[in-house]
Amino acid sequence: MQVNDNKEFQPLIVAFCCNWCSYAGADLSGTNRLNYPTNVKIIRVPCSCRVNPMFILRAFQKGADGVILCGCHPGDCHYTSGNYFTRRRMTLLFSMLDFLGIERDRTRVEWVSAAEGAKFAATMNEFTEAVKKLGPNRRLEDLRCRKQ
Amino acid sequence: MQRIGVFVCHCGTNIAATVDVKTVAETLGKEPGVVISQDYQYMCSESGQNLVKDAIKEHNLTGIVICSCSPRMHENTFRKAAAAAGLNPYLVEIANIREQCSWIHKEIATATEKAVILGRAAIAKVHLNAPLTAGESPVVKKALVIGGGIAGIQTALDIAEAGFDVDIVEKNPTIGGKMAQIDKTFPTLDCAACILTPKMVEASQNERITIRSFSEVTDVKGFVGNFTVKIKKKARYVDETKCTGCGLCTEKCPMKKVPNEFNMGLDNRSAVYIPFAQAVPKVATIDPNYCMMLKTGKCGVCSKVCSVGAINYKQQDEIIEEKYGAIIVATGFNPISLDKYDEFAYGQSPDVVTSLELERLMNAAGPNGGTLLRPSDKTHPHTIVFVQCVGSRCDDSKGKPYCSKICCMYTAKHAMLIREKYPDTEVYVFYIDVRTPGKNFDEFYRRAVEQYNVHYIKGMVGKVTPKSDGKIDVQASDLLANEQLHINADMVVLAAAIEPDKTARPLATMLTTQMDTNDFFTEAHPKLRPVESATAGIFLSGACQGPKDIPETVAQASAAAAKAIGLLCKNSITCNPCVAHSNELMCNGCSSCEKVCPYGAITYIDKEFRMPDRTTKVRRVASVNPAVCQGCGACTVACPSGAMDLNGFSNSQIMAEVDAICK
Amino acid sequence: MNKNLKEQVLRSSGVNVLKCMRCGKCSGTCPSYDEMEYHPHQFVYMVEKGDIETLMKSPSIYKCLTCFACVERCPRNVEPAKVVEAVRLAAVRQQDGNHLSPDMIPEMLDDDLPQQAIVTALRKYAK
């Protein structure tokens, strides 16, 4: 985690992007030179439904401050129904995180198509700001994993 | 021990301007397992690729990471380069430090830091990459066309032309479909039968085409290139191989009061029948619902008169199993049932007919031999009212939400033909909009108005009332004149909406293809892949995909044929190796994965396992068909025991990436 | 165009006039068409335009039989009869709107007048 007392808190954000829509959308925001913060690190997955809730918990455990999951718009999934699974699974996961006391704003599911570079950048800016406001993730972080 | 090579690309200044590539290469060089870390101006150039190839050979690398542009751009380039150097192409990972780093960030320090983290994640992942080999599955060089209308016939002819065997499965006793029932075609007014029947004959004579009439598809198994299809050949009680189609049995059959479905029930046929004179195959069929012999065992006239002994009252349904490489769906359409619309009095008066019934009434081979007469009293109608958009463009609760597309044109055609043949007949067309986008379509409609003096009235018919004198009162609004009209008509013709055939939905389930809410098959991409379904190896032809007129249907039929030929030309199909696989030792046979798989790629098999005490035990375990799996990974998350994993994006690989990013 | 009136008519009818595809089947089916100055399809269209005062002044609102033939037969489920009813209701409400307002009460107060009568008057009587 990159907490520097002298500087503004810089959250670590993990973004899971599906290969067909959101990853391409992220590429498009790069092609159009639309800025978003360096805090966001993207992991490519074939489909948003490939994202196991375990990955998200692992990210939080290892010190991520926010996790965002991006997939194709409902009805547009390359694999026809993958994002519907995502939607259901994440609803469940988020309600569990809620129960654990993880702020709702630390997690998000967004639908970004391959043509929505601007939306991708805007979403990342907005999400980073939201997580910044929440401060570092302490509750789910495994202190044994913390970098000394 | 892994030996990993890292190659950092400058991409000219695209990356190097915001990311300190030297530092990235240096830092990543210190990562565990990395034996060589280099930077270069243009990694994708030939010399850049040679650099990678030489490093693979020289350092005997077991995996490489390229820090460059998006994998969507050059992943294949570097995979090919790796393969050329003897490294499995799936041991290549790309860290996207251009689109997702240098191009969106401005500050060198933070951008470099992020590039290092992205590189580190890719290194962590490549540590766990396994060499993958793309499997191949053979292609059966034969196609199945479901539906024998003009779409199916055209597709079959085109595929046969290319030198492949085709089977047409048609549920009716003859091929030809709706086009065979149509009298004339718009906008040229040439006779439908004159252009269709030669094609039907061509299909029957083509040695590569097998017509399986009076048959239905009952089961589809398999995947692209290798479908196994069960076809039910319904008993027609006539031996197809013997019947010459002489028609003597149909003449002699004493049961003559069977509604003739080919003429839309406007006249009668016999219980043993040939649908129409140009039927293909021209073979008689016995209707078991009406045949006295089959119902009561008393008659047998047809078998007595048949000189070739083709009649067989004991014939049974038969199931045929065939293998196909491609399936083309051409199930077509039907007019909707008008029972819901009692304001139009369809069913209350025989003189209120649908447009398809009017086609038969006007057809020379129809019930009146081509003379337009009222069905009720066989008199010549002097005032005919056409009602457009009956059941089309409705709210979901009232009918079909879509425009049926063909009604405007065929109504103009009907109006024109009637006015030409019977100039003493007044023709009124009530329309909401006249939609004529097509070559020579609007000209055709204008001709109906200007040359043939058809009365086009903007407005809708509100109520149709049959009167005691045999006339029909049509109450309608004329929106432009702002008045309500009452027309004393002799006949009313309803342009009923069209809907997909009822057999389409069960078929879609068998084929695991998608349908929209109206039961039209969904194409793989609405613009760029209009004739393929989202399921590989299944193609769409004609009105089963959406309302279409004949030229459009034929165009789509040929397009679907071209796509199918492209598939059949291949000896084998290369499969995507990034597919799911199940660890049989961990699988508990719960079927969770089977249920989420959108492709039906997962099946359960009973497998023998050796137990620690040297006994064997049979367990039910999941098995993924790599040729069908598309690699979405839905099953991997659904699996409660963690047995299901995805090649190229395994649980451990993604976890390693997460760990590397969060380090 | 009176936005408030349009809003009121849309709310009290519960009809989405934008669903109308202007086929005119409502007017084609209307039994009191010839009695009406404005016909069912015009009601829907004029409400969409917000031209409601014209409708409120027209005797057409009392000519509708509320037979619901148009509701039954509208292919788009627009329910024109409910629009007519809503316009009629708007007209009725407006005629009824000339009640006393509370700030007029103090100057009219009479010591002999029972409290209850004042409240009743407020509700019942026009100015």
Image (cartoon, grey):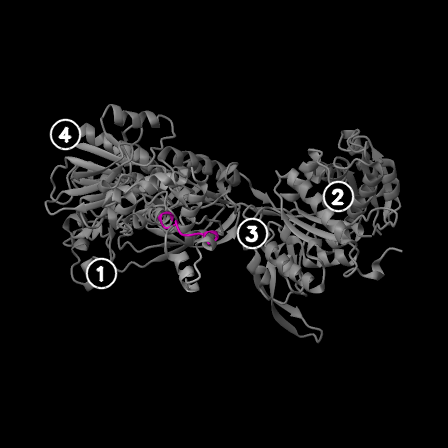
Query: Within the magenta stretch, is there residue B331?
Result: no
Q: Earlier in the sequence, mark 2 or mark 4?
A: 2
**Label 4 sits on residue:** B424
Q: Residue at x 58, y 44 (%)?
A: B573
Q: Residue at x 26, y 24 (%)?
A: B450
Image spot of residue A64 (x, y percent): 77, 53
Tag 2, which secondary structure?
Answer: strand
**Label 3 sits on residue:** A81
User: In the displayed structure, would residue B579 be above or below residue B153?
Assistant: below
Q: Mark 1 and 3 residues: CB-CB less than 8 Å, in contact?
A: no
Mark toward the viewer: 4 or 3? 4
The circle on residue B294 is 1
User: In the displayed structure, would residue C83 be above or below residue B218?
Assistant: above
Image spot of residue B338 (x, y percent): 28, 49
The circle on residue B92 is 2
Tag 4, which secondary structure?
Answer: loop
Circle 3: is it few (<14), some (14-19), or many (20+) Cα within 10 Å?
some
In the rendered structure, the residue with mark 3 lies on which chain? A
